Image: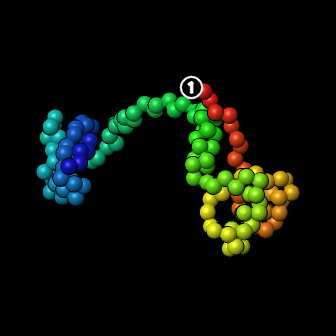
Amino acid sequence: MIVYDLMCGNGHIFECWFKDSASFEEQKCAGIINCPVCNDTRTDKVLSPCMVKRNSPEKKSEPDPQQVLQAVQSFVEKHFEDVGVDFAKEALKIHYGEGKKRNIRGTATADEETLLKKEGVGFLRVPVVKKMLN
């Protein structure tokens, strides 16, 4: 169903319901739409006032950065093998297919990080955060 606001030739505005827009056109051409005030059959569609109600936006609180970092750290600890100071060595082995492909974590010096970048080994530095006491 579709609702149109219509105006007759005498300026009266009224509302009519139709099956679809084609039904409106058919009935208008047949002259069977008439104004309920003056019975005029000269009708045209007019703009309908409408309102779109939106739910009031909920205030989204920003996540606590400390908690986000702790969640990332917890995930890495759970899903990545700790290779300690051998991180660069193990990462290169994996990169060149000489080591078992797996998720690893550890530490690297600035020179080792430069070498890894030069060799095209992808890695991400994740800051270590102190655990919060509950």
Report the residue at 19% width, 43% height from top: 16
Q: Is residue 128 visible?
A: yes
113 in relation to 53, above or below: below
Report the residue at 57% width, 52% height from top: 79
80 or 1, nearer to the observer: 80
Q: What is the secondary structure assignment of the residue under circle 1? A: loop
Q: Residue furthest top?
A: 134
Q: Position of residue 126 (x, y in %)?
A: 69, 47
Q: Position of residue 87 (x, y in %)?
A: 74, 57
Q: Residue furthest right?
A: 111
Question: What amino acid is labelled 1 in the image?
Answer: Asn
Report the residue at 60% width, 32% height from top: 64
Say whether residue 39 is left or right of residue 11.
left
134 in relation to 23, above or below: above
The residue identified by callout 1 is 134
Q: Using the rendered view, name the quadrant where residue 123 is placed.
A: bottom right
Q: Position of residue 5 (x, y in %)?
A: 26, 41
31 or 23, nearer to the observer: 23
Q: Using the rendered view, name the quadrant where residue 11 is placed.
A: top left
Q: Residue furthest bottom?
A: 97
Report the residue at 74% width, 66% height from top: 92
Q: Using the rendered view, name the quadrant where residue 30 is placed.
A: bottom left
